[in-house]
Image (cartoon, grey):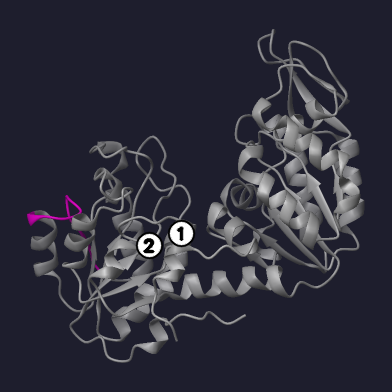
Amino acid sequence: MKFPKKTLDDLTDLKGKIVLTRVDFNVPLDSSQGVTDSTRLEAAAPTIKRIIELGGIPLLMSHMGRPAGQVVEELRLAPVVEPLSRLLGCPVKAARDTVGESARQMIDSLQPGEVGLLENLRFHSEEKQNDREFSRELASLGDLYLNDAFGTAHRAHASITGVTEFLSPAVGGYLIEAEFEKLTEVRDNPERPLMVLLGGAKLADKLPVIKHFLEQAEVVMVGGAMAYTFALARGNSVGESRVEPDFVDEARDILENRDRFKGELLLPVDNLILDTTSDGQRIKTTTTDSIDEGWEGMDIGPKTVEKFCQQLESAGTVFWNGPFGAFDYDERFARGTRKIAEKLAGLEAKVVVGGGDSASAVKQSGFADQLYHISTGGGASLQLVRGVELPGFKVLDDK
């Protein structure tokens, strides 16, 4: 499906114009404030370069982390300046604030061929509140608006929706356009059979997605910590595993009414578990229905990996969101997720990874280049494949 909104390609002459550009530079940093993964910078580069080619001056704005409306020195955007400048091959100037005198002085100093970067949007609580006056002040910094931050397109924040009340035209960038087309392909026209892998910790976030895909896909495979709530709903012992008691009834309803769904639901049959009473060294594999007190489920087990991989062999399209184990906590609990990634890399099926931790896991496994599409947005990709209209898309100018 073609992106129904205007994009950068609908603009022809940007000479001398300040293009207020929402990007997603919420990148991981090491203890020395170095960028450890530049994927999001690389994803935004084609749009930024094209603005410059058209004679415009990109004025970038992004958030980083969760500063809760306060200035947090460790969450300044300064660490992205050098790698972004190197990537673009041009100077990047950064302001010490998002709005106000610092921002305006930086903007006034910009020359054609240079890029401006405003400070962390979330240093201002008005950003998440979608405050109208803050939106107006942001809009006053540019001549037109462009959104290329897919990872935040599901948020109705000042820099995403609010500014479009005061700034026109409002268009999408190349990243947003590509994300829309790849993800709606999964939603509207997948090659069958469609198989869905859903992992991660929070069943609360994934329940609507599980229900949606049980109606749309041939097979839905659930893993990660949220699978233990399903185990609890079955009456199994889950030990110290992470569960969400408030959602046990909904999980039980799905299990008891599987016949009303088109798709088959597959859950783990074994798990790698950790002895929480020891020093963290004792681990073992057990069946899903027998996790004793003092033990916590940390990864899917080898039989589950085998079961899921066998099922995937016949897939035409695969959508994956969420890791199957605590891969970022301990290397020992990354095996399940990496085995699944390895299997997906060898399939002829179109494999789309829905951002977030699953995207990080795929990149760490070394199989990213062998997959059809890896999204830059976890929550946004889940909303889009469910058919929810993203606020950041809705406010852009129609074609």
| 247 over 285 or under it: above or below | below
Q: Is residue 239 magenta?
A: no
Q: Quadrant of the N terminus?
A: bottom right
- Name the outermost residue toward the bottom: 12
Look at label 1 and name its amino acid. Answer: Arg
Look at label 2 and name its amino acid. Answer: Val
Q: Which mark is residue 354?
A: none
Q: Is residue 96 magenta?
A: yes
Q: Which residues are magenta?
A: 91-101
* Residue 284: x %, y % from top left: 82, 21
Q: In screen coordinates, is 7 left or right of 100?
A: right
The crowding category of the residue bearing disc 2, from other C-alpha atoms within 10 Å (few below 14, some 14 to 19, many at least 20), is: many
Q: Which mark is residue 40?
A: 1
The disc, 1 or 2, on the residue closer to the chain's N-terminal end is 2
The answer to whether the residues at label 1 and label 2 have Cβ atoms under 8 Å apart is yes
Q: Nearer the viewer, residue 346 or 126?
A: 126
Residue occupying the point 29% across, 56% down:
81
Label 2 sits on a secondary structure element that is loop
Look at mark 2 in the image and give the residue it sits on.
23
